[in-house]
């Protein structure tokens, strides 16, 4: 989560995304310096308390973290970055999700999530379909980082089947991370994914991932 307030901003998220989140923090700090000079950005590890069970279901502590941050009157917004895959099937309001396609369904779920928290300052963001979708933005960067440049073509073959990396589906056997593991057996979700995505950079990811871009755009306008 990103807590945007007059005194401090905090990210709470699964820790393996730390490198990429630093990139987002740096970008938003730079952007806010001009239109919002009173805003500051502080990373505080004591606030990294979002917890997930082995089934990836959000624990009560995770929702409590959101509520706790929203109790701060100086917070302009609290936002999240959670994988749509897995989360969508475990929330208590899963049967209310509407839409045939991923983009529609993720927006439906975000709206349900927002209503569940019931605070106008809460901006839920769910990564469609999971974090590794952004790795497919640049097969070249992924293959080079994983020291197997010859496998770039295999990633490109998958990428070309979809309009956007965000469209790579959430079937348990064909999620972006599963596809990566089939191409790169030594791929480590915790170690490799954030490094690759940070190397690709926000600009290129925003160009190819419309849902992600909408989220960052909303944050820019605060």
Image (cartoon, grey):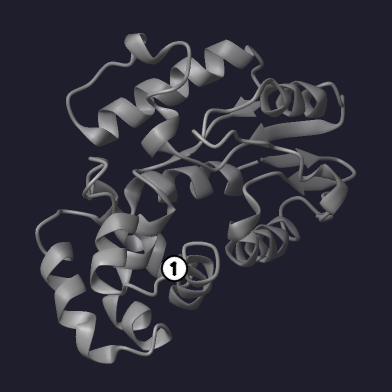
Find residue 186 and report its image quarter. bottom left
Dividing the picture into quadrants, the one containing residue 179 is: bottom left
Viewer can see residue 168: yes
Report which quarter residue 119 is drawn in: top right
Percent of width and height locating residue 210: 33, 49
Question: Residue 196 vs residue 185: left or right?
Answer: right
| Vertical order, 213 against 113 (above or below) | below
Q: Which residue is drawn at the image coordinates 86% and 40% (left, top)?
A: 6
Q: Is residue 3 above or below residue 29?
A: above
Q: Residue furthest right?
A: 7
The residue at which mark 1 appears reads as 203
Q: Position of residue 75 (x, y in %)?
A: 80, 32
- Give the vertical position of 80 relative to 27 (above or below): above
**Residue at 37% from the left image edge and 24% from the top image edge:** 89
Q: Secondary structure at mark 1?
A: helix
Question: From where the camera sits, is residue 38 visible?
Answer: no
Q: Is residue 32 left or right of residue 97?
A: right
Label 1 neighbourhood size at 10 Å, few (<14), some (14-19), many (20+)? few
Q: Which residue is painted at 59% across and 44% down in the image?
A: 219
Q: Quadrant for the C terminus, please.
A: top right
Q: List x then y, in percent, for residue 38.
A: 86, 50
Quarter of the picture containing the N terminus is top right
Residue 187 is left or right of residue 15, and the answer is left
Q: How many marks?
A: 1
The percent coordinates of residue 73 (x first, y second) are: 87, 24
């Amino acid at each position: 989560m990103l807590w945007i307030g007059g005194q401090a901003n905090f990210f709470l998220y699964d820790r393996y995304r730390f490198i990429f989140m630093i990139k987002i923090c740096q970008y938003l700090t730079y952007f806010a310096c001009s239109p919002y000079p009173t805003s500051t950005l502080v990373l505080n590890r004591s606030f990294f308390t979002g917890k997930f069970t082995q089934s990836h279901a959000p624990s009560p502590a995770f929702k409590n973290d959101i509520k706790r941050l929203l109790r701060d009157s100086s917070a302009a917004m609290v936002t999240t970055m959670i994988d749509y895959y897995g989360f969508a099937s475990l929330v208590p309001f899963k049967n209310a999700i509407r839409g045939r396609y991923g983009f529609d369904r993720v927006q439906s779920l975000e709206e349900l999530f927002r209503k569940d928290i019931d605070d106008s300052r809460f901006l839920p963001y769910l990564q469609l379909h999971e974090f590794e979708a952004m790795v497919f933005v640049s097969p070249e960067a992924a293959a080079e980082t994983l020291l197997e440049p010859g496998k770039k073509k295999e990633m490109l073959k998958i990428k070309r089947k979809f309009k956007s990396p965000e469209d790579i589906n959430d079937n348990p056997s064909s999620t972006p991370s599963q596809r990566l593991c089939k191409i790169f057996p030594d791929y480590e979700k915790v170690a490799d994914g954030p490094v690759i995505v940070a190397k690709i950079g926000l600009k290129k990811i925003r160009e190819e991932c419309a849902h992600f871009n909408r989220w960052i755009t909303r944050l820019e306008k605060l």
